[in-house]
Amino acid sequence: MIALLGVLGVVLDRSLERESVESLTESLASQARTIRSALPNDATAMQTEAVRLGNAGGLRITVIATDGEVLAESERDPGELENHLDRPEVREALAGAVGTDERRSESVGQELLYVALPPEAGRIVRVAYPLERVRARQAQTRGTGALGLLAAAAAASGGVLLVSRGVVGPLRRMTRALEERGEGLPPHLAPGGTEELRLLAGTLNAMTERVEAEMRAVEDGRRTRDLILSSMEEGVLLAAPDGTVTFANRAVVSHLGTRPVTLGALLPMALRTAAERAAANGGPTAVEVETGTPARWLRCALVPVDPDGALLVVVRDVTQARRLESVRRDFVTNASHELKTPVASIQAAAETIVQAAADDPDVVPRFAARVEREALRLSRIVSDLLDLSRLESGSEPTDPVDLDRLVREEADRFAESAASAGVALSVEADLPVRIRGSERDLRTLVRNLVDNAVRYTGERGRIDVRLASDDGAAVLRVSDTGIGIPSRDLPRIFERFYRVDRARSRETGGTGLGLAIVRHVAENHGGSVEVDSELGRGTTFEVRLPAA
Ligand code: ADP
């Protein structure tokens, strides 16, 4: 704006100057005409008049003959002056026009504006006016003009400053706030400045809030996903099409032992091969692999994720399932085997009876007794199996049971058989011990332990059944001075159908399930059972049950 005002000023100044010179020229020409008509013809009188008129008008008046000779001069003696024919204004006047020129006069030592009229009666009247005076007036005008322009420029600058401040300030504040927001600082732009800026701030605020809400939702979703994936038992691993592992949850690390960086680093080898095959052919694959010590079995599902060719691997630890499966298989085999023996025996005896009924009736009672014995054994096995299966499904024992009374009653049942086997049975269960549980199961537990003790203790042996309270728990101890158990068999005697001496067990009517039932009952009551035995010396079973 200032530059524009400056240009305007210069143009105006130029045109004003031209204007003033032109109007001065015109006024000088008209004055010259007046002077010309007032000048007498006589040379001396003309000189005197020229001087008078020159002084009165503040002008320099020169009268020049058409041959250039100066006839009269208001400021100098005309005789001293040279021929004026070569002066530009004189030449123009001689050519018939009003001649003008601006120059420094050597005669008077001043810059002058000359105006010469065309000759009349052989005389050219020329008037000159000092340009200095014109310039002084012009300078004055110029000063006022410049001052005005300056004032206008100042006012314009002030105005622009005010307006820009109203826009730039709030814009800067908004930019700063947005930059800070980018670094995660609290949002919200203070609305300020002009109406448009307030509108802009409002729109930006609304937009930011929306973006933040969306970011929060995304973050919540991510957190939920991470929570779910990290608490899953299944290992979940995602690999990019180039084989880089982009995600692996905690379970992957615990199943595989490490967090693989690429599919190529996947171990065990069988899993890596399967992963590479699945990634290559694009179809889902499942593989079961063995890894680590102690050996664990992992079932891995490999699913290519469309459409980008990423691969999802889900790893599940199936060791427990596999073990259970093998236990179940063993159990079925064992149970079938255990059942088959008495059944075969019954079958054989029955066939013998059928034949002997005709040929040799005397042997019939012997074989009939065998049938009865084997049937009894069969029934014991079946009943123990039923007990076991009931106990395995777990129970919630809640009835209050007087354990002391129960132990006394169950142990007393064996008084007769112990006496006939020549074994001393002593029972010490006098202090009242009450627990919560299933009376039926607890009876089975006591019965199995005392029964074993009687069966595996020879003549002149001793059996002690003791019930005591220890630190809030009921402790039942059944110890005998019997044959004892070899230490290598100790860890296995609670397994189903496990027997140290199969023949002796069978002879004495054992099923191989008694101790398995004892352990299940103890565990169902939140307790435990332990054994301590020395071969040939005797055995002690200790059952601990939390008191009511
Ligand atoms: P069984 O019906 O054969 O007695 P159990 O499960 O009760 O089956 O016991 C498993 C095995 O533990 C028995 O076969 C026997 O070898 C051993 N056993 C159990 N109790 C005693 C004991 N008191 N003394 C010596 N051996 C025992």
Image: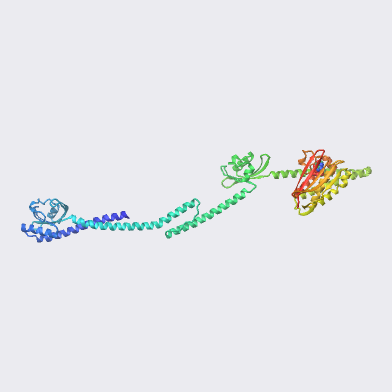
Q: Position of residue 270 (x, y in %)?
A: 64, 39
Q: Position of residue 480 (x, y in %)?
A: 82, 42
Quadrant position of residue 152: bottom left
Q: Nearer the viewer, residue 253 or 261?
A: 253
Image quadrant for the N terminus?
Answer: bottom left
Name the residue at 88% across, 47% down: 416
Q: Position of residue 532 (x, y in %)?
A: 78, 41
Q: Is residue 459 left or right of residue 314?
A: right
Quadrant position of residue 4: bottom left
Query: What number of labels is visible?
Result: 0
Q: Nearer the viewer, residue 319 or 499?
A: 499
Q: Is residue 126 left or right of residue 369?
A: left
Quadrant position of residue 24: bottom left
Kindly tell me whether residue 344 is visible in this rendering.
no
Q: Is residue 419 left or right of residue 302?
A: right
* Picture quadrant of ligand 1: top right
